[in-house]
Amino acid sequence: MKPNSSKKFKIIFCWLIFLFLVFSSLKPVLSQVEPGTLDILKNVANRAGYETETPQDPVMIIIKVVNYLLTLVGVLFVLMIIYGGLMWMTGGATDFLWLGGASQEEKIKALMIAFFQQEFPFRIQENKLVIETKNNFSKFVVLFKDKFKEILNLELEVEEKIEEVANKSEKPLETADKNGKSTIPPTA
């Protein structure tokens, strides 16, 4: 377990307890009943000889337990939906949200995965973050210049690393004969 994972677990666990307590304390609302109406009805029922206090029936106890369990399942479901949406919107790289005490290199890697879905070689020079990108990807990386400045407080500089394509002057591996059938030439 990473050091940040325990912090993440504590935060999620606290929210889970909080939401459980909030949702389990909600009572059904009696619509269109003025305050005191239920007391009047209980008094009338007592005078008529009816018992107003319901004994603890085992069925009612089971219903309350099931109600609390379903509330807990509902809270877990809502948390899973929120977490799933967060994972979807950040492309699965939510590590940067929990990186309070992480090193700057770890934050940079997490942000690159979140923004670009891959890591690039980088270095930090004074107050600059220099990222080495592949062909034609530097224009896309520059779009996130403001975000890197806002989150990391570093100016972004992009160096484009041009990859040379291997010389393809060799004979093709496959040729077609006069009938259009594919043939593979023998190797020398």
Image: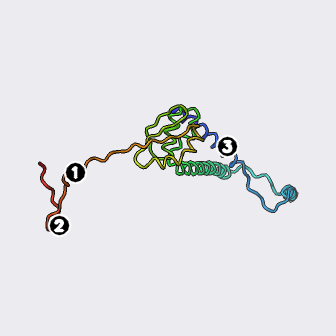
Q: Is residue 74 left or right of residue 111?
A: right
Kindly tell me whether residue 10 is visible in this rendering: yes
Q: Is residue 159 left or right of residue 171?
A: right
Q: CA distance from mark 1 to mark 3?
A: 68 Å
User: Image height check: is 102 above or below 164?
Assistant: above
What number is the disc on residue 169?
Answer: 1
Sequence-first tag of 1 and 3: 3
Residue that badge 2 annotates? 180
* Crowd around label 1: few <14 · some 14–19 · many ≥20 (10 Å): few
Circles 1, 3 touching at the beta carbon (< 8 Å): no
Position of residue 74 measured from the top left corner of the image (x, y, whole percent): 61, 51
Residue that badge 3 annotates? 18
Which secondary structure lies at badge 2? loop
Position of residue 184 measured from the top left corner of the image (x, y, whole percent): 15, 56
Could you tell me the amino acid type at mark 1? Ser
- For the point 54% across and 51% down, which residue is it? 89
Q: Nearer the viewer, mark 3 or mark 2?
A: 2
Which quadrant of the figure has residue 161?
top left
Q: Is residue 171 left or right of residue 128?
A: left
Kindly tell me whether residue 1 is visible in this rendering: no
Q: Nearer the viewer, mark 1 or mark 3?
A: 1
Which secondary structure lies at badge 1? loop
Position of residue 51 measured from the top left corner of the image (x, y, whole percent): 80, 54
Sequence-first tag of 3 and 2: 3
* Crowd around label 3: few <14 · some 14–19 · many ≥20 (10 Å): few
- For the point 57% across and 32% down, which residue is it? 101
Which secondary structure lies at badge 3? helix
Q: Nearer the viewer, mark 2 or mark 1?
A: 1
Circles 2, 1 touching at the beta carbon (< 8 Å): no
- For the point 44% across and 40% down, which residue is it? 132
